Amino acid sequence: MTGLLRPSAVGRSPVRVDGPAKVTGRAPYAYEQPVREPAYVHPVQATIARGRVTAIHTGAALALDGVLTVLTPENAPHLERGIDPELEILQSPDVAFRGQLVGAVVAETPEVARQAAGLVRIEYERAEHDCVFSADRTDLYRPEVVNPSLPTDTSDGDVGTALRDAERTVVATYTTAMTHNNPMEPHTTVAVWDDDGLTLYDSTQGVHAMRESVAPVLGLDPGVVRVVAPYVGGGFGSKGTAHAHLVLAALAAKRTAGRPVKLALTRQQMFSLVGYRTPTVQRVGLGADPDGRLTALSVDVVEQTARIKEFAEQTGVPARKVYAAPNRRTTHRLAALDVPVPSWMRAPGECPGMFGPEVAMDELAQACDIDPVELRIRNEPETDPETGLPFSSRDLVGCLREGADRFGWRRRDPRPRARLEDGWWVGTGVASSTYPVHASPGTTATVRISPDGRYEVLIGAVDIGTGAWTALTQIAADALGVPAEDVHLHIGDTDLPEAPVAGGSSGTTNWGSAIVAAARSFREKYGPDAGPGDEHTASTAENPFAQRYAMRAFGAQFAEVRVHADTGEIRVPRLLGVFAAGRIVNPRTARSQLTGGMTMGLSMALHEESVFDDRFGFVVNHDLAEYHIATCADVRSVEAYWRDEHDPYVNPMGTKGIGEIGIVGTAAAIANAAHHATGARVRDLPMTPDKFCE
Amino acid sequence: MIPFDYRRAGDAETAVAAVAGNPGAAFLGGGTNLVDHMKLGVAEPDLLVDVTRLPFDSVDPLPGGGLRIGAGVRNSDLAADERVRTRYPVLAEALLSGASGQLRNLATTGGNLLQRTRCGYFQDVTTPCNKRRPGEGCSAREGYHRYHAILGASPHCVAVHPSDLAVALTALDAVVRVRGPRDGHGERAIPAAELHRLPGEHPEWDTVLGHGDLITAVDLPPLPMAARSRYRKVRDRASYAFALVSVAAAVELTGDVIGDVRIALGGVAHKPWRATLAEAALRGRPPDRAEFRAAAEAELADAQPLRDNRFKVPMARNTIVSVLAGLTGEEPR
């Protein structure tokens, strides 16, 4: 590696490049893309959890003024089969989960499409469905791998014996709830067929990823599919993979004789069509000596997947990476149910997987009578516990110490249920955070000089609200050695060089690395005196250090919790996180990512739960009045800090990714603080008032 | 949503006649609940009669010291009314604990009282619900019923009424003024505590109002003890959530004992629940936590919680204790 980029624009906090357009309403999101004479499509969803459609009556819908067509399994255009069952919609009468697409109405207005969808009458042959998630099921199975392609089980030493022989043990079961991503902007697509092929204006985290998913299902060469996404209102993973509605928009637009078709899912529809986080059951075992040094660590995870398509959340994975212990085991088992397809939700694996073990560490600290910060420091591994590789950089201990200082941890009375203020029990807690460094070699970028002398930087990246527009401009400026004002960035279009999704906290890593590669080779080729028309494209290579170092970001989160002594209401007046995540490109947007992650972690800890009624197979509380996300009133002081971390191995910018680590560990810190406040150990999320009301 | 006609009423008489004469018609206030229901298919009116321009948009003094609240007064305006804030703080607190600022700016006094349950099955037309379609069965009884009733439910319905305002009005002995198709040019008065009903055999009826009955005003009696009143709402998040349980209360101390007390509970029944047993148990008793608790337990003795809402019984008990302790100057524990 030729050394880290010398920062000039990087490390500063310019205002968002896209800010003025967004706050003045001039940034077109997918649904707002101006197209000529659009028609509108509204889905019809199955109201049974398993079975098949035996008849579909479309007469009333078709009779409605303004209805153009009704798509059904009987008449829908053909799709290629055997590629992705989630995307192969309307190809058979079979129903695999409630809410699955069984039809759609295309009409002149969204109102008429919606009204007509309500007039489509469907007859079913019901089959017995099974949506009951339980760790006690006898048909749990072991997936081949867990997301994205990690070992399902790991084992070192002999955990059973070590736990039995340990002088201090914690063995307990922890659960996290089914949760839904719920980005502010619903999933929307505008599909346009013309002589050149298909254009999809889509609210997505990855334009090329959508093209790669949807083109083969439509039987198209990816080259004739264009996906455009200049602005996206959040995704949290739910827009990282293609979902059924994207195909539906394309199918509907096949039946409109060239008219574009617009589709916007309702909030309720999002609860069955765009993924969610599986509920998890985590059986955690910790064994330690009286000084708190771990001798055994096990995490056995049970979670659910959809019968039609497997997604195995890697919940046990972080426990392989954080603490040293000679005897270790992680396992994952799945229940395949008649449920909607689970998928990525902010920090899949790490987020739920740092709940159980990090609460267990708090319980172990109590069992050993050791401060929970000190306990974590004592178990700091010298190398990656799973692979034995050295870490490219790792500063969990620094995060814990700095966080403890900033938070005022030393003044803490360790006794639980010891502080009562104005009728509220008060406590504090800590937990560790971690998130891997992901990289996708082959990410491509182009640098060229436009006729007006500006540097144009082209890459098929997507800014889902994170600040990529701004951060990539800064990186490009430094890589080219020019002021940021001289850089004109183009992103969000498959016509631009190929780039991976905004996911896995890897956007800046992948896209930035490609921009640096293109800029450096552009300079090598043209020197400092490049002129209009000069252009160069480059791709990222495999990182040679990836095989020699373990690469992860770490952090420590501290929480203050108040629990009302009479009612059990729980509040979090203070969250403080310190992170070691490599170099920070833009402190303004980075802080927003980290505090946003922590806020979502608070929401997961106290509020979020998709209440699944397994009799019907649906989420009962499927709107934002009933599915609770933390409100402003729930979020008081949230502070995020970071350590200066110099890591020459991860990538030319020295970045590790910050989009997800903020949500990792928050819920455990809050649960640990709630225990410190009340003496009640809550091991099941969300921590609602009933769990503290006695 | 299906197409519908919209008419703006110029006066109450026309409005009542327009709705009464059409079984598919409904009054439109702020629309914060009705329009939601129209999108969801829960309500399918073919005519909306907008009553927000009727002259029911002020809060006026009543002879004798009470206040008349026009049915069209927006929740935000009512909560901000100085007379309400000083003389009936329980009412202002109840309003401000409901919904969000934007919704309160739109929602009217009359519409707030007539909002319908938030039961998830009621709001999803693909599941059975006796309130939506009598005779279909109740999905909540064996399903998701964390928010549901612990008092006064029936085998047909376990829903709760979601209004905070109604709970405060019940504690205050407010009177709802109604003009209906059979009332001629006059109005009839219904005590707030009797406006809503228990589900019994007819969960489809939320209130005692008939089709075409229009709420025109709510009268608050002069109630000096209400100056010392409070609304406490316990919920799953700090804002924008419906009550798990709520307590509206006012206390008057006479010497060392409780002279008079008003308590109403929200989130526990199909209607705001006036805690008459607790009130009776407290009159003449010293204001201490043990007395409050005994009174609360007396009120909740007949509670019949469901599988997953047993917590509401201790939560309601503790909240009653907490509110009464606060009102009588008892230290928080």
Image (cartoon, coloured by chain):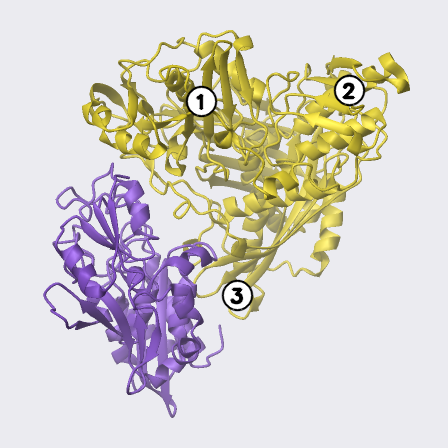
* Horizontal and vertical percent position of residue B136: 15, 41
Identify which residue, A223 or A37, lies in the foreground: A37
| Helix, strand or loop for disc 2 | loop
Q: Residues within 10 Å of mark 2 (few under 14, many from 20)?
A: few
Q: Quadrant of the C terminus of chain A?
A: bottom left
At x 84%, y 17%, the residue is: A531
From the viewer's perspective, tell me whether residue B62 is left or right of residue A490: left
* Horizontal and vertical percent position of residue A584: 75, 37
The single residue placed furthest to the bottom in the displayed view is B255
Identify which residue, A484 or A514, lies in the foreground: A484
The residue type indicated by label 3 comes to Trp
| Helix, strand or loop for disc 3 | strand
Q: Nearer the viewer, mark 1 or mark 3?
A: 1
- Is residue A322 among what the camera can see? no
Provide the residue designation for mark 1: A246
Quadrant of the rendered structure where residue A649 is?
top right
Q: Which mark is residue A424?
A: 3
At x 52%, y 19%, the residue is: A210
Does the CB distance between marks 2 and 1 fall below 8 Å? no
